[in-house]
Image (cartoon, grey):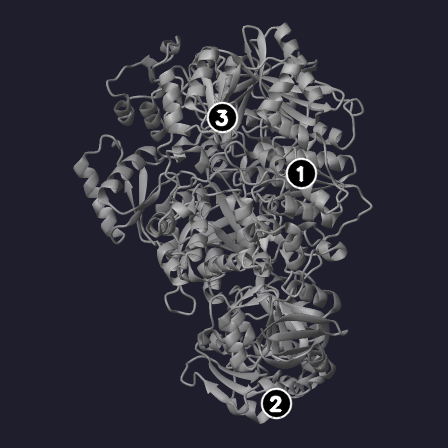
Amino acid sequence: MTAAYVALEGGHVLEGRGRASGTARGELVFTTAYTGYEESLTDPSYEEQILTFSYPLIGNYGVRSERFEDDRVHPRAVLAKELTEDVADWLETEGVPAVDHLDTRDVVTDIRDGGAMKCGIAVGEDVTEEDALEQLEQCKAMSDHTDIGAQVSVDEPTVYGADNDGETVALVDCGAKGSIVDSLLARDATIHVLPYDAAVSDVEAADPDILFISNGPGDPANYEQAISLVEEFVEDTPVAGICLGQQIVAEALGGTTAKMDFGHRGVNQPVLDLDSGQVVMTTQNHGYTVDEPGDYLEVTQINVNDDTPEGLDGVDHDIITRQYHPEANPGPEDTLDFFDNVLEMAASPTQRAVPADD
Amino acid sequence: MSTDHDESSGDGRTILLIGSGPIQIGQAAEFDYSGAQACRALQEEGARVVLVNSNPATIMTDPEMADEVYIEPITTDAIAEIIRKENPDGVIAGLGGQTGLNVTAELAEEGILEEFDVEIMGTPLETIYATEDRDLFRQRMEKIGQPVPGSTTITLEEGESATGLSEEDLRERVEAAVEEVGGLPVIARTTYTLGGSGSGVVEEMDELLERVRKGLRLSRNSEVLITESIAGWVEYEYEVMRDADDSCIIICNMENIDPMGIHTGESTVVTPSQIVPDEGHQEMRTAALDVIRELGIQGGCNIQFAWHDDGTPGGEYRVVEVNPRVSRSSALASKATGYPIARVTAKVALGKRLHEIDNEITGETTAAFEPAIDYVVTKVPRWPKDKFDDVDFELTTAMKSTGEAMAIGRSFEESLLKALRSSEYEPDVDWADVSDEELESHYLERPSPDRPYAMFEAFERGYSVEEVVSLTGIFEWYTERYSRIAESVRAAQEGDFTEAAIAGHTNASIATTAGTDVGSVEQEVPGRTYKQVDTCAGEFEAETPYYYSARQNEFESGPLEGQAAAGELEVDPEIESVIVVGGGPIRIGQGVEFDYCSVHAVRALRELGIDAHVVNNNPETVSTDYDTSDGLFFEPITAEEVADVAEATGADGVMVQFGGQTSVNIGEPLADELERRGLDCEIMGTSVEAMDLAEDRDRFNALMDELEIAQPEGGTAFSKEEALELAHDIGYPVLVRPSYVLGGRAMDVVYTDEELETYIEEAVRVSPEKPILVDDFLENAVELDVDAVSDGRNVLIGGIMEHVESAGVHSGDSACMIPPRSLDDDTLARVREVTEDIAEALKTKGLMNVQLAVQDGEVYVLEANPRSSRTVPFVSKATGVPIAKLAAKVMAGETLASLEASEQVPDHTSIKEVVLPFDRLPGSDPRLGPEMKSTGEVMGTASDFGTAYWKAQQAAYNAVSEGTAVVDFDVDGFENHFDIAEFDDVPQAIREGEVDFVVSRDRDSLEMAVEEEIPYLSTEASAEAYVEALDAFGGELEVASVTSRPVHEENWG
């Protein structure tokens, strides 16, 4: 059996069963979803993180690339109570260390009580506790990954649905999930996927009906170029954002963001729409949140559990953002109509350039 | 709709809650749990709750559960009377199972709800019709684009009758229907039945014709549904919740291990789903939300799907069925996730929004979320296979199980093995005698209660996973894990215990397998620790003490101690604490009564300021509600696992008197185990030794002789000759039974040498290893049951019950009355004396049940059991004296004097009548006899015996007062109420609908009566009582709440 050690911030080391070899370090987080492991493991927002599944049995229905959100596995390492052969083989091929036979409930409650923490992992025939501790030593804080966008974004602009008749979307790829593109394509949009550090001219070249900031990993403050794109275009072009995208929009318009203790990761986060009174279930994966929306944005939806902003609208601008993942995959399809609303807004913008001469 | 009240609270409103009546196959204790939870939820919101249920064994019918409690028949007449008295503002229909739903529909149809301005709260009636009428349902699903299995109905035209339909006419309609859904096999179902009665996969046309004819006759709306068979697909259930603002959530989904074609109540079920990918799961989740919205359901609802992997990323599904109410599955989902579906349903019915309802488990979140779970839950049904030799227990689309056990583990293997252990079922098979061929055809291909065990056996014989998958149709992921369990056992036999322990075996069973002792096993294997059920997979800190045990991983070994053993338990060792051991799954002979007793014990302890922990595994019950106890341990009931709880909690004592035979059985091994571990924890109340003495015939006989208490003459025979000799000495008739089985199994009364010889040859095969008991049968004796509480010095008699059926009918199947009516004062005084003497001799501390027979003024003792009995709740409901609570308190050190307890005799007569499961078990013998067969009970109370008996018959669905009767007994009086008819072929006459009532001992006639759902009686005693009831009943139901019925303080006897 392959040895495996997991070193937690503070120096406590857990022993487990090695399922995919290698060493890794990252921010230790957990998701409470019990299905959707393929989607989660290929979600770029997990970049630089070590993902713990709170559900004990992972990999039960195999691994199929049709269900991937990106072309590679993003977490640095994977922890579970029990991984199937299928998923262990896949992670081995991807070079992502995996450990099981752990008391993952203990790990989860440690994260809950201590916050998302640094973690080092060593898996292999001859690895020792020290190897894991060494990884822990080298682990950086999430906000210190200042160029994390480069790791997850496209290098060059790419166009999807060029022949579609719908709206044109400039999607700034800070680590976009494939399902966001799919959801827009399904609504007949043409999507220009632009690098996370796209220049103003790149956006202008796409001549979009809407500027859409994607989800992605890390601290929103590190996406300066995307922030400046929002500032640049918001007066003339409708803006939408998902997850990190919402945080970037808030940062751009005078709002603030903050790091959460351990974030929201799962497919059961309840969101209350303040207007309709209706609660919907959402997929979430974020460690940062909008703290103050600022004067140009109003909170339209909140998390029922902790009141954090889940949806923002522009006060005077055509802006809609969501902290959660309306594109689902994994998770509930309750909020897919977000994409209809976004494209409607793109089709018939209502905004007047009010703050232009502020 | 507009009301004068605050829309979202219960302030000032009176709500009528209708229970589900007696425990039956398909409708067990789950509605006691949901009803009890709803009562509390409604009262929290300021509503005045009026409750009606005919089942006295339930917690919900305790006087303190609602503002007014009525134990009355669940009929429109009785409920209309209650509505007249209580003037409720609303009725919640969806909490009382199919029974509650049906009666609410009838109340509406008869105009009673409108007349008294009673609003149907929560789910509207129109929705109920739309889900129960499968054709309407299909139309609604098609409207919202949801795929349903191909389906059509065969309907009787107006004026047609099922019996009058010609063979050709029937065949023509059935053939057309089969063609419409794509050919045989098909599923034939009758609408408006509970638990899928009379439905099944039909492969052949002749069988289908038969079924359709019967279905047309039994259906409330003369319809039989023919559907496409989706056998082999995976069956899912989704539990859905919706509020008035259209917020909808899924509480959980459940995956049936057995493929489609087996009723979900008969299937091994796992939560959450394991083998459906997220995309398929989300498609069904979205479909479930679309369906609940389309149907306008407010509250909880259950939606069934069939799904299979058709090669697309999400697979393909069909919507199979919707239950617009709380159900057995919702009880299971509540226990599996910690989300209290009935509580939230009740609050939603009052108008609350999900995000306005607290999540009591976490204390910081709301009901507007979907539970996340970080464990695997497995449910295993429990079948009454041991009680019905004549019945084929192949699992089909109709339910035959009486109850279920649930277990929680960190792997499927652990969860499955804990569930199988909890079900307390042992296949009656010696695998060594079973050939491979028989194993395959009889145990693997054919689904039965024995199949899980047969799968282990197959792997032991070297079958591959592929072979077992192809034989059973059970999905590969599961089958593979069965094979791992078998592998772990093989490793244990070779001395490596770790895998077997992690797979969920107990140390004790590993020790037995490996031929070693528990002490050495436990040093080598990982210990167990406790984890919390928190609704959120650890995301929030939870406050509720709901726990399960799990083995640590292979990197640890040896028993865990202190904090490590306690795991996530929040225990304060300074506080005195006691473990109450529950009764496990509901089965014949051990029903909801023992859950009632367990819950009362818990409440009594808490009233004394003692922390009460519950160990139980029945998801249907109140005892396993997270707020019943100070610590809920969802565990198998074995000495080892209960001792683990004692060790982890530091409990001071364990009560094993309240959970029926299940808890009593672990008394002795538990005492040994506690001692082995050196724990300072005692078995409370009457000693284990005294309980054993009461069950040891020889020692008990000697004790009775010493006390000069009469017993029927008898002895033990080790051969046929000895048996005959004994019978001659005693004189016929004699009662015969094997000495090695408990609970009346294989018991019989014989009147001649010939009958005795037949019994020995055919039924039991007496041998030196298996002797039989031969006892004087006290013919025409009056049988009595006495429930009493003793504190070691004084005895309080809860009640003396007189049986309606005479000796020869199992006491659990006999109707009985409180107070008795045919005993004189001297006899009653002797009954008291006998009870007191036995209680004293057994040093009873707690409950005791004594069964007595009175013949010619002499009182004989048949049996004495120093523990709770199934009549305890009936006695308490009839007299108002809470004897289970008193018992728990004296066991905890109080005295009857310090509790100021006194005996009470009711002025009215209460009758307990039983409900029998023969309609669910084709081929069973419907005659009452020495073997217990009833699943549940009802109570009827009135100022005279006749009316009370009549109400009990109504409540037991066995009341008929006019029409044509067949009477085979020499009992006068039926002719005043019925046309008495004679037929050459009675069964045929019954089948042809010419008979309305059967009073007979003829098995064929009775079986036909059962099949045709016609009331019947099988004993002379009940026939006499029935005539008396018919004569006495004047139409006045005497409906009254339990607390308003007069009782007076007086000692029994």
In the image, taking residue B575 as reference, residue A141 lies left or right, namely left
Work out which residue is located at the far left of the displayed protein and give it: B168
Q: Secondary structure at mark 2?
A: loop
Q: Secondary structure at mark 1?
A: helix
Residue at the spot of label 2 = A197
The x and y percentages for residue B431 are 42, 47
Q: Chain of mark 3?
A: B
In the image, taking residue A53 as reference, residue B1013 lies left or right, namely left
Closest to the camera, between mark 3 and mark 2, is 3
The x and y percentages for residue B635 are 61, 47
Structural crowding at the residue carrying mark 2, measured as other residues with C-alpha within 10 Å and reported as few (<14), some (14–19) or many (≥20): many
Structural crowding at the residue carrying mark 3, measured as other residues with C-alpha within 10 Å and reported as few (<14), some (14–19) or many (≥20): many
Work out which residue is located at the far bottom of the displayed protein and give it: A201
Circle 2: residue type: Asp
Q: Chain of mark 1?
A: B
Name the one closer to the observer, B96 or A88: A88
Circle 3: residue type: Val
The x and y percentages for residue B337 are 59, 53
Q: Secondary structure at mark 3?
A: strand
- Residue B43, which numbered label? 1
Circle 1: residue type: Gln
In the image, taking residue B595 as reference, residue B206 lies left or right, namely left
Looking at the image, do the residues carrying marks 3 and 2 touch, with CB atoms under 8 Å apart?
Answer: no
How much space separates mark 3 and mark 1, taking CA atoms?
A: 32 Å
Structural crowding at the residue carrying mark 1, measured as other residues with C-alpha within 10 Å and reported as few (<14), some (14–19) or many (≥20): some
In the image, taking residue B374 as reference, residue B815 lies left or right, namely left
How much space separates mark 2 and mark 1, taking CA atoms?
A: 59 Å
